[in-house]
Image: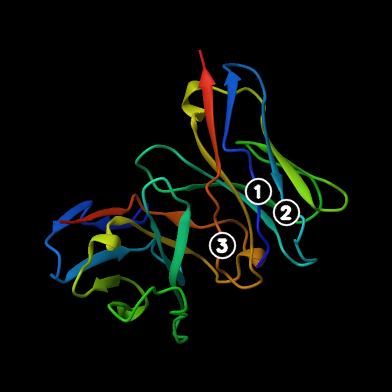
């Protein structure tokens, strides 16, 4: 199974863009990159996913490098409510996400 | 329902007792997953149900753990003879389809059951 590495923590000023990096150097050709976030005491929440093209939805943008070995989740205008643990994961080729310990994002007022 | 419902939200049990955790997925979701999350850790896959297919139990940590899904809907995770290392948040998720790379979106998780074994 492909694995991901993320920085353990990041700070971001409210209103600024939060850029969360993820390395997935062993990703295989048919595996998607998925991002989830977990706000304290809640279950993880799906944010976005992509294969090789950049993706955007109402929550965030996902930038995947051309070699697919890394990606960046962008929250364009971070708010205090975006404070959470952000998980980058890739599919195992079936359905078992391998979640690491994620990046703890703290949005500062 | 509107979301994935799990019950109870909190459970404290004595070591050696059996516990049952319940998950009610989103109506129409054919795939159901159980994960657990120990304090400060990531999510650990436990078991996966897809429609009427045999479940993938490969993530269950020991034979004290079992799960069933009745009628393709509600699922129960049972832990027998609980141990202190079983203390964790047990999360259930559901989705429309199995292979996430072919779905139109990710899982929907419930809020979890916090199990404490004393």
Judging from the image, mark 2 belongs to the subunit labelled: A
Q: Which colour scheme is used?
A: rainbow
> What is the C-alpha distance between the residues marked 3 and 1?
14 Å
Which residue is denoted by mark 3 in the rendering? Answer: A97
Which residue corresponds to the image point at 18% horizontal and 68% vertical from the top-left?
Answer: B19
Kindly indicate whether the residues beneath marks 2 and 1 are on one polypeptide chain.
Answer: yes
Residue B104: quarter of image: bottom right
Q: Is mark 1 on a helix, strand or loop?
A: loop
Residue beneath the point at 43% across and 37% down: A39
Mark 2 touches mark 3? (CB < 8 Å) = no
- Which of the 4 image quadrants contains residue B17? bottom left
Residue at label 1?
A5
Is residue A83 shown above or below B114? Answer: above
* Residue contact between numbered discs 2 and 1, judged by CB atoms under 8 Å: yes
Residue at image location 25% in from the left, 73% down from the top: B78
Whole-Å distance between the Cαs marked 2 and 1? Answer: 7 Å
Quadrant of the rendered image containing residue A11: top right
Residue identifier under label 2: A24
Residue B94 position, x and y percent, is: 44, 63
Residue at the image position 37 percent from the left and 53 percent from the top: B38
Q: Mark 3 lies on which chain?
A: A
- Dot placed on the residue nearer the N-terminal end, 2 or 3: 2
């Amino acid at each position: 199974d492909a694995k991901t590495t993320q920085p353990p923590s990041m700070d971001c000023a409210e209103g600024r863009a939060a850029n969360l990096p993820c390395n997935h150097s062993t990703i295989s050709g048919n595996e998607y990159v998925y991002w989830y976030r977990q706000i304290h005491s809640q279950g993880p929440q799906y944010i976005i996913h992509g294969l090789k093209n950049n993706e955007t939805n109402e929550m965030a943008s996902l930038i995947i490098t051309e070699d697919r070995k890394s990606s960046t989740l962008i929250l364009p205008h971070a708010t205090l409510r975006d404070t959470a643990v952000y998980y980058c994961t890739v599919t195992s080729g079936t359905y078992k996400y391998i979640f690491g310990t994620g990046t703890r994002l703290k949005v500062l007022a | 329902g509107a979301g994935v419902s799990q019950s109870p939200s909190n459970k404290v049990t004595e070591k050696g007792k059996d516990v049952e955790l319940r998950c009610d997925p989103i109506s129409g979701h054919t795939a159901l997953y159980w994960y657990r999350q120990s304090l400060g850790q990531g999510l650990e896959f436990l078991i996966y149900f897809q429609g009427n297919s045999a479940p993938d139990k490969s993530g269950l940590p020991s034979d004290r753990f079992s799960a069933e899904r009745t009628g393709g809907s509600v699922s129960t995770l049972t832990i027998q003879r609980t141990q202190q290392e079983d203390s964790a948040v047990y999360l259930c998720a559901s989705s429309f389809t199995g292979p996430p790379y072919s779905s139109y979106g990710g899982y929907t998780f419930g809020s979890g059951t916090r199990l404490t074994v004393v």
